[in-house]
Amino acid sequence: MLYDLVEEFVRYHGRRVIKRLILDRGFLDGAKIGRCKKDLSMDVLIPVRKDMDIYHDVVGMAEGRLLSFAVVPAPEPAVRGVPLHRPERIRKREEARQRTLAKKKAAAAQEAKTTGLTPVQHLRSEVATVADLQTFTTCPVSLHAVVNREIYSDGRHEYWVLLDTARITHAVETRDLYRLRTSIEERHRQLKCFSDLERFSSRAFSLVVNQVVLSCCCTACCSGIGCASVAQNCVREAVLMPWRSCGPR
């Protein structure tokens, strides 16, 4: 279904408008990936499954110490701003959550002290690249891999692999690029579920944008004074009902 949509988009808008697809492993299809690269002029970045030959090939190279791994710099902790005007119930709920987290942390520390076992922690991430792979036999183009190795405090390590039809110059940048997929999916989920986009029937782009902006602004303003239900009613009555009466556009 996805690749059909891509084909249709290129048919109407031309090549090189979409330059890259960032997909999950559910869309692993060698022939389709090759067509995207060769015929549609777009690169595909996608992870592999652990039961695939290409995964075992690159992991075997890593285990055989044939790859040169580099440490991934630790991301800077995100600084979240605290709203100036938070409803009392939200403030109390956050304080209760922080107390619960503190209790769990103290309990884990006490258990580790009693048993002498320290909790397993993720120490670092490492990346390496492998170029010009041909073992994805259904794919007619060469693939390039980013081999990710996660190191844990108990000595254990795990691998996960990304495939890219574009040549990889900086493995960390490719790894960070793939993280956009989950961010995009989460943003789409919020628009669909919390900005009332799913209930909107019009296909006119300008009206869709107007609906999203009004929903987000109204919800943001009203949630600051604890009136989320007012926001929902406001958007539904002021925006949705007049357009629905006219039908889809």
Image (cartoon, rainbow, N blue to C red):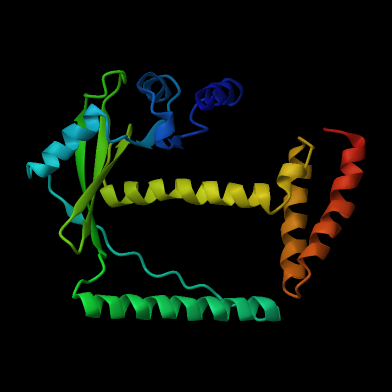
x then y, percent, for residue 227: 79, 69
40 versus 58 height, above or below: above
Camera-side residue: 51 or 195?
Answer: 51
Residue 36 on image: x %, y %: 42, 24
Q: Is residue 6 left or right of residue 86?
A: left
Residue 86 visible in the current orientation: no
Provide residue 249's location: percent of width, then percent of height: 82, 32
> What residue sits 18% from the left and 36% below the top?
58
Where, by quadrant of the figure, is residue 31 drawn? top left
* Foreground of the two, 113 or 85: 113
Q: Is residue 96 left or right of residue 214?
A: left
Looking at this view, name the residue that lies furthest to the front: 114
Q: Residue at x 62, y 52 (%)?
A: 190
Is residue 108 among what the camera can see?
Answer: yes
Q: How many marks?
A: 0
Residue 9 point in image, percent of width and height: 58, 26
The residue at the point 53 percent across, 75 percent down is: 97
Which of the 4 image quadrants contains residue 155? bottom left
- Assign the N terminus to one quadrant of the image: top right
When asked about the image quadrant of residue 125, the answer is: bottom left
Task: Decide: is 237 above or below 144.
Answer: below
Which of the pair 204/102 is nearer the observer?
102
